[in-house]
Amino acid sequence: MKVAIIYGNCRKGSTYNCVKIVKETLSKQGDFEFQEIWLQKDLPDHCLGCFNCILKGEEYCPHVEKVAPIVDTLVKVDGIILASPVYGLDVSGAMKTFIDHLCFMWMPHRPKEEMFSKIGLVISTAAGTGTKRANKSMNLALDYMGVKRTYSFGANVAASKWEDINHKKRVRMERDLASLGKKYHTSLVKRVNMKDRLFTKGVFIMMKKMIAGYEDGNVDKEYWKSKGWL
């Protein structure tokens, strides 16, 4: 199976080490291929708010050369892991930029049907606090893309380095992450037969009714028609 990992920074600190434990756990369960995306390197440009992706099509994004390969990766994998440290009580700027660039593929616009069968996992760590809010931001992004299930892990580590985390706390984190990794693996295996969430069904039906009322020629409406959803 293939899993895409989107990192909100390149520091390889506590968040990175949490992901590493999940990767090791998954690898023990079966044959996994991890495709890693480092946002500060692979998508360094901020969203300009130009609305091109929404009103014209994602191919008109000024950063399409960087965004398109990431979208292509997400479409082809079985699972998606979003990992971000907490900066200013929320996700890192790089992770927020990633979320902004992909709003065009949320259900209110042009969702990728492949996303409806994927399993998500969000991971955040903070030296102080803010993991709940950061995880909520990442969870919502995956929810509106239509991801079938999403799991979360957050830890306020009271340290700026992985090595400086209190030993007992780190052991507990390692245990919890290994357990979560096994749970994530089970969902990946069973994902095709899982029922769609009520949230996904509800938003999809609501947007179907709304988009059906758009004028012909609207980018979103034409996309939904091409998928046979209208």
Image (tube, rainbow, N blue to C red):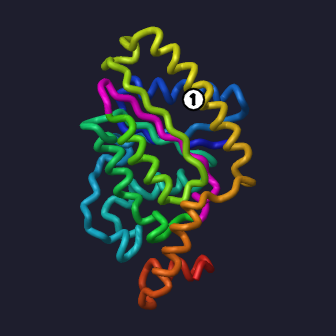
Q: For this view, does 208 lie left or right of residue 228?
A: left
* Percent of width and height locating residue 114: 61, 60
In the image, what residue occupies the spot 41% across and 66% down?
104
Residue 177 lies in magenta, yes or no? no
Estimate the x, y position of residue 17 in percent, counting from the top left: 47, 24
Q: Which quadrant is the N terminus positioned in?
A: top right
Magenta residues span 113-129
Q: Disc 1 on helix, strand or loop?
A: helix
Mark 1 residue type: Val
**Residue located 55% across and 67% down the image:** 202
Extreme residue toward the top, this view: 167
Disc tally is 1
In reply to whether residue 122 is colored magenta, the answer given is yes
**Residue drawn at point x = 42 percent, y = 47 percent:** 138
Above or below — where is 21 with respect to 73?
Answer: above
Spot the residue most to the bottom: 216
- List x then y, in percent, for residue 169: 45, 15
Instruction: Assign the C terminus to one quadrant of the image.
Output: bottom right
Left or right side of 116 for 134: left
Q: Which residue is mark 1?
A: 22
